Each structure stands twice: as structure tokens, then as C-alpha cells.
Amino acid sequence: MEIIVVGINYKQSPVEIREKVAFTKSDLEKAYGEFKENHFIKEAVILSTCNRSEITAVAEDVEKGVHELVKFYHQFFGLPEGTLTEHLFIKASDDAVKHIFHLAAGLDSLILGEDQILGQVREAHGNAKALGCTDTILNKLYREAITTAKKIKRTTAISQNSLSISSIAVKFVEQIFGDLTNKRVMVIGVGKMSRIAIENLIYKGVKEIYVTNRTKGHAVDLSKRYSEVGVIDFQDRYKMISQTDIIITSTSAPHYVLKKEIFEKNFAQENKLCIIDIAVPRDVDPEIGKIQDVSLYELDDLKRVSMENMESRVEAAKHAAEIIIEECIKFENWYHCLPVFPVLEALAQYREEILEEEVRSLMPRLEQASEKDKELIEIVMRSLTKKIIRKPILNLKRAGEDRQGELYASVAGQLFGINQYSCKPGPCRECTKICSKNS
């Protein structure tokens, strides 16, 4: 089994490419259904955010697994073969493991150490698990990566004054306008990114924020929470354009929510309008940015602002990387010991069977011994049998960590008369999830 990651992110791909492979919530069930039918992909987790679309998978063979994931991207999104070739990144084995740890900790994010990615990673794993597309390996990998990310945020300064994409967007418009207190803002969408933007706008002193969303009730909930927030009907969003200084939009719509033809008919003002589109796929028709007095900024334009926050986090990131190295080694040791786990369990069971057999044979011959003496004898026998197999167990674990687990497990199985892929009937335990041959 090999761990692989195939995907697209902000490093290699502009937003117009990333939006072509963005998974909607409705896409996930269909995608995971296809993975369940794929003989080369054994486990999978899909992570789709504004800055990345990537799939972590467990495959029997790296080359075949990568081929299947690349083919999946093109076929699932209806793209001509080769469209994504120059934009895809591929990681395998230890590099894939390190990538997931770095990802969860925010070390691979546009904004170093951002908090939002941890929740997105947790949600992605939860969705895959709920749809039955993860098992022992990816469950372990994502649990450890999430736990390590929490430790990093708790013990380093990497998330101090952390900035999400939404707060970067607000800082961006602040640099353009200066004082925001007298500006009118329309926010389209009420998801997490929009809520963060609203809170940052209020913190900057904005008094008039108009929120619109297809589901009006969600916008009304925000207006009850913040006195600065008013609600407008979604179909009236174009009417607000001439009364607005700033538009921040972040919806999950698969199409433009601001189209050039309708926008132009409603845009008639002397003041300049700034639009920040932080959605993937994009919410705003790029042609709107060519209209006079309209400034349109997309995700990739925020990179410049994010760089200003980089230096203060570099030292914290170095410490975080050291923590990740240690945790990756622990995971990789566990991962490479998978072939020996069934033998270790079988040895422990074998020891118990011998112990029980000898105790049953010995006790009837100790009629004169007290119950206390019998208990002591059994304790000594139990300790002795543990000591006898302790060294073989340690050697098998070391062999696994040295990536010779399969060879040593096979040899140990032959020496002790144990087949590492023979599991007794009953609930599937960790070893049987790997060998998949429990009877």
C-alpha cells in the first residue's frame, strides 16, 4: 500500500484553473462513489478550498494510483486530456505524509499558519469517513496531522495575529481606501469566510454592511447578531451597486452571481467601486473588472498583502517544521510496521494459549499449595512467557521501522508457524483491515 497526493493549488495554478476542479458538496458523494468502484484506489480524502483541490489516496501501486487520480480529475470535470498536466502536483510515500502534516498546520497555505485550513482538513476527512472512503491508514494519518496542527498552534506563535483570506481581503480594501468608517459595503454570501469578513469590517469601524444570500434566513440571522448589518433580497443585489463602495463576495455558486450585462445597467456612480471576489469558482465575471471606475481583485491578488505577514511567522514556522518532522517519523514508523502487526498479535495470542495450557496442566498437581502460592506461580509463568517473546517482538518492530517489515513478518510467521494473513472470525481489527483476508 502507498500513500499518494495529487492535486492543484495556488502555487502552480491561477484561479481560472483552480475553479475548474473545485468540488461542490453535491460533487463529493458522486466522487467518493467512483473511488469505491476503483480497484486501484483503496482509500481517499478530497480537500477542496478556494486555494486548492487535492486528493489523498491509498493505492496498491504509486504509478497506477497517480494515473487513476489524474484521469479522474479530467473525466470528473469534463476536461480534455492533458488540460491539467502542467498544473498538477504529485507527492508519494513519505513526501505525501509530510504534505498532509504541513497542510493541516497551515505551513502550505497562502497565508502562513492560517487557522481556517485546519477546520477544512478536519471536515474533508470527516466527509470521506462518513461516506465510507477511508480506513485504517488515512484515518490514522489525518488524526495525527490534525492533533499535531493543534499542538503547533498551542505551542508556537505561528497563529498569533493570524489572518484568514477574509481578513486579508478587508486589509486589502483598507490599503486602497484608507479609513473605512464611512464606506458602504455589500457582502454576498453568508458562509464562514463572509462572516469573518463582516467581523473584520465592523472592527475597522464600518457602520453600514448589507448582506445578501440566496437563503435569506441566514442573512437575517447575521443582522440579529450585528447591529451594523442590514439584509437585502438576493434579487436586489444589482440595485445596491450604485449605493456601495465595496463589494466582498464569497458564495459556493457554480456560476457568476454578478454578470457584466446586468452589472453595467445598474452601475452609474461617480465614486469608485472596489470588488473583492474570494470565491472559487469565481462569483464575479472577470469582464466587470474592465469597466471604468471598477476595481476587481481576486484571490491571487491577495498574495501581495499576505507576504507582509510572512516574515513575522518564519521563525515560528521553523519550530513547527521541527515538530512535524518528529510526528511524521512516528507515523511512518507505525505505517511501515503494518505488515508485522498481525504477527505481533498472533505471537501474543500464541503466548496466551501456551500459558493457559501449562497452567491448566500444572495446577492439579499443586494440591498442597495455597491459593496465594498458586497465584504467585501463575504470575511468574506469565512474566516468563512475556520475557521469552519480548526480544522477537522488539526485533519485528525494528524491522518494520527499517522498512523490512514484510520480509521479517514472513520469516517470523514461518518460524512460529503463524500466517500473518490468517485472522480468526469476528470483528475486524487493525491488522485485518490491512490484509483484508479475515475469514
Image (cartoon, helix red, strand yellow):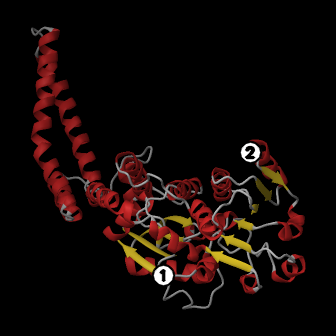
Q: Nearer the viewer, residue 1 or 80?
A: 80
Q: Residue at x 74, y 42 (%)?
A: 225
Disc 1 residue type?
Answer: Gln
Instruction: Quadrant for the N terminus, please.
Output: bottom left
Q: Position of residue 90 (x, y in %)?
A: 42, 78
Q: Is residue 328 left or right of residue 409?
A: right
Disc 2 residue type?
Answer: Tyr
Residue located beneath label 2 in the image: 226
Q: Nearer the viewer, residue 72 or 436?
A: 72
Q: Is residue 92 left or right of residue 302?
A: left
Q: Residue at x 67, y 71 (%)?
A: 277
Q: Is residue 48 left or right of residue 216?
A: left
Question: Tag 2: Cα neighbours inside 10 Å, few (<14), some, or many (≥20)?
Answer: few
Which is more N-terminal, label 2 or label 1?
A: 1
In contact (CB < 8 Å): disc 1 and disc 2: no
Task: Evaluate whether residue 198 shows in this view.
Answer: yes
Q: Position of residue 234 (x, y in %)?
A: 86, 62
Q: Residue at x 15, y 19 (%)?
A: 363
Q: Nearer the viewer, residue 122 or 58?
A: 122
Image-quadrant location for residue 61: bottom left
SS at mark 1 in the image: loop
Q: CA distance from mark 1 to mark 2?
A: 39 Å
Residue located beneath label 1 in the image: 12
SS at mark 2 in the image: loop
Q: Residue at x 23, y 41 (%)?
A: 348
Relative to residue 4, is residue 384 depicted above or below?
A: above
Residue 398, disc: none
Which numbered disc, 1 or 2, marks the residue closer to the eye? 2
